[in-house]
């Protein structure tokens, strides 16, 4: 048996050496010395039953897909893979590297850059951790009339803002671009004084999206704007036109551009141009965002100041956010710390914040399942101004 093993090893290395010397380079497979093209010329001195037939580089995929696996040898040999003959008993299958072209290896190693999203969403991940201020009592009743239409009724009682009633409606179309989005989307609400806020969002093409927003105050137009957004494979460009008045020569133009540099790094910029009779100006800013496995860091620098946010997801229950804002015109800086604690088993969502102005706030939301009822409590205390606000909310539906 030992002599047979030595003989087989000597024969196997002789075959490989002959193949490397006699093989010609194959187009698309690099150097011919790394890939055996054929073994027909080196089999004259050996028996066919003693050979291991390699797959041809041009027919290997066909053989692997069409040829059935050979039956085990009657002598107890080890069955080979598809397209290969059985290995003689007492021997193991030699490892043969899979041929691949340099272009294919480069294509597999390089992944396309993702779309970075919109410029406005860069700081949103961190801001969602902070609680929203609550004051007074708020009752919200949501009612779904169909799969596409929903209405809401909101009653607010406050000692700081105006108390009143608002009616809202939301319509979602049947043009589904992905499992999470459908277009067109129309959202609007009107209060008891006749003031209206409305938005219409529609996707004109696979990469083009538009939005129109209007705001009225007691039957008078106050603001309106039109957004146009284009999403490429690895960049997003957007333009916003607000309150344009051709006769008076006034309006606001905002342009955004965000480009993915690497799968984790995105860079972009913003240009804001405003014009009115006797005055015009422009403000530019640059943005950089780094996205890790469980963190997002964003920095915005411009003539108006700096804005930096950091979001970190500690685990499935705890999320932390840090925000820093510096306004060069107002000569003010603010640093804030926020956190969100989610307790799924208790259906609890707790958010808290603390900033450099000594403002402490927190909100607590509790879902009373199986009832479609959500309770919310909120309290904010400004130590420097000695002001305290608290609120209570109930959402049905």
Image: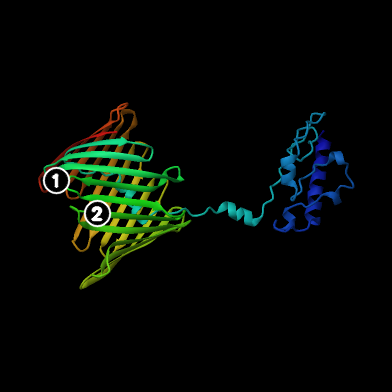
Residue 312 percent across, percent down from the top left = 35, 45
Question: Residue 43, which numbered label?
Answer: none
Residue 222 position (above or below residue 251): above
Q: Secondary structure at mark 1?
A: loop
Crowding around mark 2 (Cα neighbors within 10 Å: few <14, some 14 to 19, many 20+) is some
Q: Secondary structure at mark 2?
A: strand
| Residue at x-position 81% and y-position 40% | 6
Residue 35 percent across, percent down from the top left = 73, 52
What separation in Å lies between label 1 and label 2 (alpha carbons)?
Answer: 17 Å
Residue most extreme to the right: 45
Q: Which residue is mark 1?
A: 162
**Residue 343, quarter of the rendered image:** top left
**Residue 298, quarter of the rendered image:** bottom left
Residue 307 position (above or below residue 293): below
Q: Which residue is mark 2?
A: 215
Residue 170 percent across, percent down from the top left = 32, 43
**Residue 397, quarter of the rendered image:** top left
Camera-near label (1 vs 2) is: 2
Residue 374 position (above or below residue 304): above
């Amino acid at each position: 048996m030992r002599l047979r093993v030595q003989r087989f090893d000597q024969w196997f290395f002789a075959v490989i050496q002959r193949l490397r010397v006699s093989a010609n380079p194959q187009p698309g497979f690099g150097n011919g010395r790394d890939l055996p093209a054929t073994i027909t010329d080196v089999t004259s001195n050996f028996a066919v039953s003693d050979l291991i037939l390699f797959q041809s580089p041009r027919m290997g995929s066909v053989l692997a897909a069409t040829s059935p696996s050979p039956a085990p040898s009657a002598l107890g040999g080890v069955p080979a893979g598809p397209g290969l003959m059985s290995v003689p008993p007492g021997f193991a299958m030699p490892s043969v590297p899979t041929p691949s072209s340099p272009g294919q290896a480069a294509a597999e190693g390089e992944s396309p850059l993702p779309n970075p999203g919109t410029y406005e969403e860069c700081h949103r991940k961190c801001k969602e951790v902070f609680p929203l201020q609550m004051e007074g009592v708020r009752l919200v009743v949501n009612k779904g009339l169909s799969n596409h239409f929903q209405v809401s009724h909101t009653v607010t009682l406050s000692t700081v803002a105006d108390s009143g009633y608002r009616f809202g409606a939301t319509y979602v179309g049947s043009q589904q671009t992905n499992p999470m989005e459908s277009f067109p989307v129309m959202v609007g609400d009107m209060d008891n004084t006749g003031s209206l806020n409305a938005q219409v969002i529609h996707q004109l093409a696979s990469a083009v999206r538009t939005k129109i927003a209007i705001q009225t105050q007691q039957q008078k137009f106050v603001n309106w704007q039109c957004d146009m957004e284009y999403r490429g494979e690895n960049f997003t460009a957007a333009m916003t036109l607000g309150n344009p008045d051709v006769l008076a020569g006034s309006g606001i133009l905002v342009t955004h551009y965000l480009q993915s540099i690497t799968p984790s790094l995105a860079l972009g910029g913003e240009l804001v141009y405003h014009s009115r009779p006797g005055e015009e100006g422009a403000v530019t800013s640059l943005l950089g965002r780094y996205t890790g496995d469980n963190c997002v860091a964003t920095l915005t620098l411009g003539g108006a100041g700096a804005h930096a946010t950091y979001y970190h997801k500690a685990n499935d229950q705890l999320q932390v956010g840090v925000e820093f804002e510096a306004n060069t015109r107002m000569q003010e800086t603010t640093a804030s710390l926020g956190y969100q604690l989610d307790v799924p088993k208790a259906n609890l969502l707790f958010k808290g914040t603390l900033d450099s102005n000594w403002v402490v706030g927190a909100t607590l939301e509790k879902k009373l399942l199986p009832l479609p009822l959500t309770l919310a409590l909120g309290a904010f205390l400004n130590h420097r101004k000695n002001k305290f606000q608290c609120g209570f909310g109930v959402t049905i539906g």
